[in-house]
Image (tube, rainbow, N blue to C red):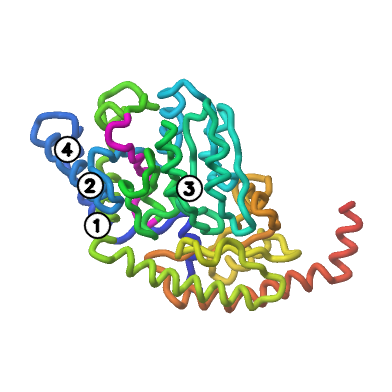
Amino acid sequence: MSRHYLDHASTSPTRPEVVVAMTDALGAAGADPGRIHSEGLEARHAVETARGQVAGMLGARPREVVFTSGATEAITMACWGATRRSHRNHSVLSAVEHSAVRRCSERGSVTLVGVDRTGRVDPDELISAITDDTCVVHLQWGNHEVGTIHDMQPVADACRSRDVLFHVDAAQAVGHVPIDFAASGADLLSVSAHKFGGPVGTGALLVRRGLRLEPLLAGGDQERARRAGLENTPAIIGFGVACTSLADGGLEQEAAVFRRLTDRLRDGLASLEGVDLFGNPDHRLPHLVCAGIVDVEPQAVLLGLDRAGVAAHSGSACASEGLEPSPVLEAMGVDADRSLRLSVGWNTTDSDVDAALAALPGILAGLRALQRSPASSTSATSSGR
């Protein structure tokens, strides 16, 4: 049976050109980019070339790019650096931020700002939560569960006028929508390579020119003394190649395909009984769709899809790493326990979408019939549920 991967929002398979570049890099001398011998200088050239490629895709200066192990480390660097910079410990963030932002911020004082039923935050409410003790405001570019995109410019302007840092988590947006760091007004922007076909284990924190932050990782002068540790040269090279794959209109071309595919998914899901689409229909990332499924547990739907050859995910954390309902969906005021997230990427085809849309009606009908069966009712009663 052929497989159909519709979980690119979790991680996207590595692009072939990235694999080739990394394989070549792994077969090279593997020298320390900080050394002045020929091998070291060759490695340094490769790292700096990749830095320029990443900066080019993100509308940043190369010196603003600090390579990390991924978005989680970049987010932690932003939280740590903001707190240490001002000796203030209050953070403002939307209630739909990724857990990496929420949990790191919770080490200090936090104000969570609510969102509407589409997952969009009101910029004025976010701004009004800023106090004299605020060191940083966090706002994601696009949501990782429902795809909603936020209006960031008013927040950036307000933060700049009050000497409060503005951090944008762009991990889910990078490689899917155009990102211009300079124009965004953000002071800090975190990204990850594996979300759009780059290698796992690498990402970056973009730091606005002139901003000095205390490093999270100390011990060496790598990354201009902003992040200690030997650079992961092969992964950094792969990150750069993934960015160049989207140059010269490539990003816009892929995004148009993604939107066409997810429009098909949205139409198909909306036609099913007991299924509600989540997220903002107008302000959304092009590559993911999230829907609520009435009275059906997400694990059963995911297992049914997997048996049909379709890999998907639930927007609810209870279907994966955690046991709690999705904080994102809770903040939106929708069912936080039963959802389905389908996401496309660089190698998704119409046949992948066809497979999901063909399988879902039978899966849902079968699960609902099972819930209505006398045997199911007897089992539930005898087990005390």
Residue stretch rendered in magenta on the structure: 196-211
How busy is the neighbourhood of tag 1: few (under 14 within 10 Å), some, or many (20 plus)? Answer: some
Cβ–Cβ below 8 Å for labels 4 and 2? no
The kind of residue tagged 1 is Thr
Query: Which residue is rendered at x = 27% and y = 66% of the image?
Result: 249
Residue at 54% over, 37% down: 92
> Where does label 1 land, which residue?
244
Q: Nearer the viewer, residue 41 or 139?
A: 139
Query: Can residue 319 be seen?
Result: no
Q: Secondary structure at mark 1?
A: helix
Pointer 2 residue? 50
Asked if disc 1 and disc 4 are in contact, CB closer than 8 Å, the reply is no
Q: CA distance from mark 3 to mark 4?
A: 32 Å
Q: Earlier in the sequence, mark 3 or mark 1?
A: 3
Sequence-first tag of 3 and 2: 2
Q: Position of residue 7 (x, y in %)?
A: 50, 60
Amino acid found under the numbered disc labelled 2: Ala
| 214, above or below 148, in the image | above
Please give the residue where the numbered disc 4 appears in the rendered image: 44
Structural crowding at the residue carrying mark 3, measured as other residues with C-alpha within 10 Å and reported as few (<14), some (14–19) or many (≥20): many
